[in-house]
Image (tube, helix red, strand yellow):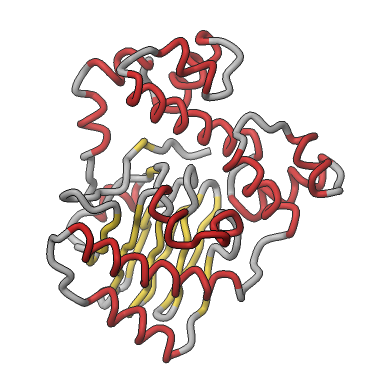
Amino acid sequence: MPQALYQPFPLPGLARGHVWHHVPETRRPRHFHSEPELNLIAAGSAAFGVGDSTISVAAGDLLWWSPGQDHVLLDASPDFDLYVIGLTPELSARVLGQDNLPAHAGATRVRLGQAALLKLQSLCAVDIGTDPSAVEHHIGDLWRDAHTSRLTTLDKHAFTNVAIESLMERPEFRRDDVALAARGHPTDISRHFHKDVGLTFTEFRTRLRLLRFINIADARRMNLLSAAIDAGFGSYSQCHRVFQATLGCSPRRFFSTDLRTRMEEAVVSPEQESRS
């Protein structure tokens, strides 16, 4: 599995959502975060790395990155035009209401018709200012429209959708638990999940537990032991091993030095990313 950094979605100001227009001169390295994210391809073509897979996209494609899913822009045509939309899981839940649980699954890539593309593109291009309420209202409309489009497209196996929904609610779920919920065989769960997500079931579950650990530790101001247990790890030593293997540092170094900031703010040039 390619190495990925923990990089939260950039949310300037006090609003819990943001839309930004891609700047081709610099790119974020391969990364994952707890915020769900949409990418709208307005023009051109590109290739994205997703786990150990690659997705080719063109104008009119809408991409969805679920919490924990690593992604990176690998290559793009000279006329590539991209809008990136992200929001906190809490705002997503409020906007989608009862539809929030299926929002974790659904299609990764949606092919939009011309009318739908122009509508979303015009919403993305609006200057929404800095007032948090106005920003969140606008992002909510965007998010709701995009989510509706995602639910009309099926590009994952039903087992994968059940697995993602289950793990979002309970990252401690084992493969056998998901197989029972999906009424499938554990081997089939693993096979379809890896094909659809580009990660193994265990790798994805580990990401979600680490994200929960970081969120809990932030809220408790460094009580790492209790955060590890509440995040679903059997012990702090297990959490430490997984954290080190995934992010390349210990939890204490991550939380108590400037490494976290440097990791979150890292950018690469297109040439660097194409060589990675």
Q: In which quarter of the image is the C terminus?
A: top left
Q: Residue furthest bottom?
A: 115
Q: Which residue is drawn at 23% across and 24% down?
A: 259
Q: Is residue 97 above or below residue 250?
A: below
Residue drawn 53% across and 38% down? 1
Residue nearer the viewer, 271 or 69: 69
Report x, y in % for residue 248: 39, 23
**236 left or right of 9 in image:** right
Q: Quadrant of residue 102?
A: bottom right
Residue 151 percent across, percent down from the top left: 59, 70
Q: Residue at coordinates 63% horizontally, 49% vertically from top-left?
A: 165
Q: Between 76 and 97, which is closer to the camera in this rendering?
A: 97
Position of 34 with respect to 158 (left or right) is left
On screen, residue 200 above or below 42: above
The mark total stands at 0
Q: In this view, does 211 lie to the left or right of 262?
A: right
Residue 148 is situated, as x and y percent measured from the top left of the image, at 52, 73
Residue depicted at 27% across the width and 73% down the height: 124
Which x, y percent locates residue 46? 39, 68
Is 235 drawn above or below residue 269 in the view shown?
above
| Residue 20 quadrant | bottom left
